Image (cartoon, grey):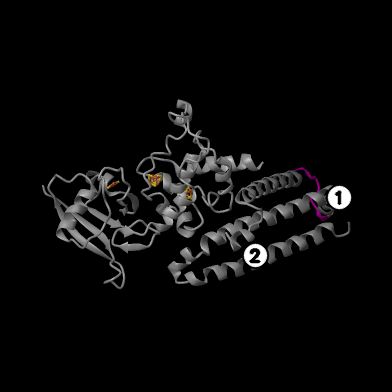
């Protein structure tokens, strides 16, 4: 029996359209498509004006985050077997739309930039490398795997309402990743930069972020750890 | 953070967080204690109530409780206002440009109301002392 799927896709080209609209496509799957991204690429052959980002097609680059049947995820990891006959695809919520499924990630990256996502260590490096014990190395597990796909931050109401002040789950994971790194020397400065009422304290523990992360990471827990560090520093 | 941090209660997010928790604990203990008093007092009448609240220790406790209530309410309402009365949130209803001004107005109203209540509460608590 032929596997025919209906796709309802958010379309918006600010140069041509007065307002966004939903366009319906149908596609008969021939069995070679495994993930939603494969289907989208076929649809783009039907209609080359359809725009979306993608690169690695295997959950590594983080470029094809989108809202799939109401839940943020990566198109390249969304198995067609697990999706229903009708698939509704929208851009990641809360960010300005550049075109169709392509959003402007400036605010997202600005929060990322704010946490100084790089090792700060002013001691002259040893001739080989800066060593870390296996236990210290383990502390950044569940953090360093983040691919910055923005699925979490764009599902977070606190980030929707204060995208300029609240780090959001993704940048928080990065902030904690460098706070716990035994090789980093800027812990105190990093904490001082997060002490305002918004950066991490705006998280209300709704856990939408945990629910959508395609890498199975837990930003809420990382935010909790940062708060504990701030509290033990402040008390 | 400009105007926003100028209107928080503590000096930082960490302080606000601590104020919120400590005040909640004080309020919780107070109301449990009050329940206990209601249950254990043999003759519950105005005289008993007035006597309880006339002693200095109880006046101090009541002041602390009103202070906690006002602080707790301010941190909470401020946080609600800075979540929902923001340009990003109000854009949905076409009021994005007015959000910051509107929030400031609401903050002033809530502030005056809460700290007015605090002053009024102190007057009532310490009357006749
Ligand atoms: S737990 Fe915090 S960071 Fe995660 S979605 Fe909720 S408010 Fe956002
Ligand atoms: S934490 Fe997960 S959902 Fe958020 S940006 Fe990183 S990989 Fe994506
Ligand atoms: S295309 Fe790279 S993560 Fe999906």
Whether disc 1's CB lies below 8 Å from ligand 1 is answered no
Q: Is residue A35 magenta?
A: no
Residue A228 visible to the viewer: no
Q: Is residue B41 magenta?
A: yes
Rounded to the nearest angstrom, the CA distance separating label 2 from label 1 is 31 Å
Q: Residue at x 42, y 44 (%)?
A: A210
Q: Residue at x 45, y 58 (%)?
A: A160
Q: Chief secondary structure of the magenta span?
A: loop
Q: Residue at x 47, y 57 (%)?
A: A163
Pick the front one: B32 or A226 = A226
Assign the C terminus of chain A to one quadrant of the image: top right
* Mark 2 vs mark 1: in front: 2
Whether disc 2's CB lies below 8 Å from ligand 1 is answered no
Q: Which mark is residue B110?
A: 2
Helix, strand or loop at mark 2: helix
Pick the front one: A101 or A82 = A101
Dividing the picture into quadrants, the one containing residue B123 is bottom right
Q: Evaluate if marks 2 and 1 touch, with contact meaning CB atoms under 8 Å apart.
A: no
Find residue B4 and report its horizontal and vertical position in percent.
59, 61
Residue that mark 1 sits on: B55
Pick the front one: B18 or A139 = A139
Earlier along the polypeptide chain: callout 2 or callout 1?
Answer: 1
Q: Residue at x 30, y 67 (%)?
A: A20
Q: Residue furthest top?
A: A134
B75 versus A119 height, above or below: below
Q: Is A183 situated left or right of B127 in this image? A: left
Dot 1: chain letter: B
Find residue B18 and report its horizontal and vertical position in percent.
64, 47
Q: Which residues are magenta?
A: B40-46
Find residue B49 and report its horizontal and vertical position in percent.
81, 52
Q: Residue furthest right?
A: B129
Residue B128 visible to the viewer: yes
């Amino acid at each position: 029996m032929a596997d025919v799927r209906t796709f309802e896709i958010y379309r918006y080209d600010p140069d041509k359209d007065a307002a966004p609209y939903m366009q319906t496509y149908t596609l008969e799957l021939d069995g070679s498509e495994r993930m939603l991204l494969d289907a989208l690429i076929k649809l783009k052959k039907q209609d080359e004006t359809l725009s979306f980002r993608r690169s690695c097609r295997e959950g590594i680059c983080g470029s094809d985050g989108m809202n799939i049947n109401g839940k943020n995820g990566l198109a390249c990891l969304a198995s067609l077997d697990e999706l229903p006959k009708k698939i509704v695809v929208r851009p990641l919520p809360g960010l300005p739309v550049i075109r169709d499924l392509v959003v402007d990630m400036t605010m997202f990256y600005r929060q990322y930039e704010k946490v100084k996502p790089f090792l700060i260590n002013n001691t002259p490096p040893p001739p080989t490398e800066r060593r870390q014990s296996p236990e210290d190395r383990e502390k950044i597990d569940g953090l360093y795997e983040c691919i910055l796909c923005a699925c979490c931050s764009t599902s977070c109401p606190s980030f929707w309402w204060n995208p300029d002040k609240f780090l959001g789950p993704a940048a928080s994971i990065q902030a904690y990743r460098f706070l716990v790194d035994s090789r980093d020397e800027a812990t105190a400065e990093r904490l001082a930069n997060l002490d305002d009422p918004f950066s991490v304290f705006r998280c209300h523990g709704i856990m939408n972020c945990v629910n959508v992360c395609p890498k199975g990471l837990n930003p809420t827990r990382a935010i909790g750890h940062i708060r504990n560090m701030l509290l033990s520093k402040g008390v | 953070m400009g105007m926003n941090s100028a209107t928080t209660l503590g000096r930082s997010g960490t302080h606000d967080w601590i104020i919120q928790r400590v005040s909640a604990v004080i309020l919780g203990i107070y109301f449990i204690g009050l329940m206990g008093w209601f249950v254990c007092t043999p003759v519950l009448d105005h005289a008993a109530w007035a006597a309880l609240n006339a002693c200095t220790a109880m006046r101090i406790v009541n002041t602390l409780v009103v202070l906690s209530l006002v602080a707790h309410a301010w941190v909470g309402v401020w946080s609600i206002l800075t979540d929902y009365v923001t340009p990003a949130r109000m854009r949905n209803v076409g009021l994005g440009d007015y959000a910051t001004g509107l929030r400031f107005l609401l903050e002033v109203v809530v502030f005056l109301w809460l700290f007015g209540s605090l002053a009024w509460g102190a007057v009532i608590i310490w009357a006749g002392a």
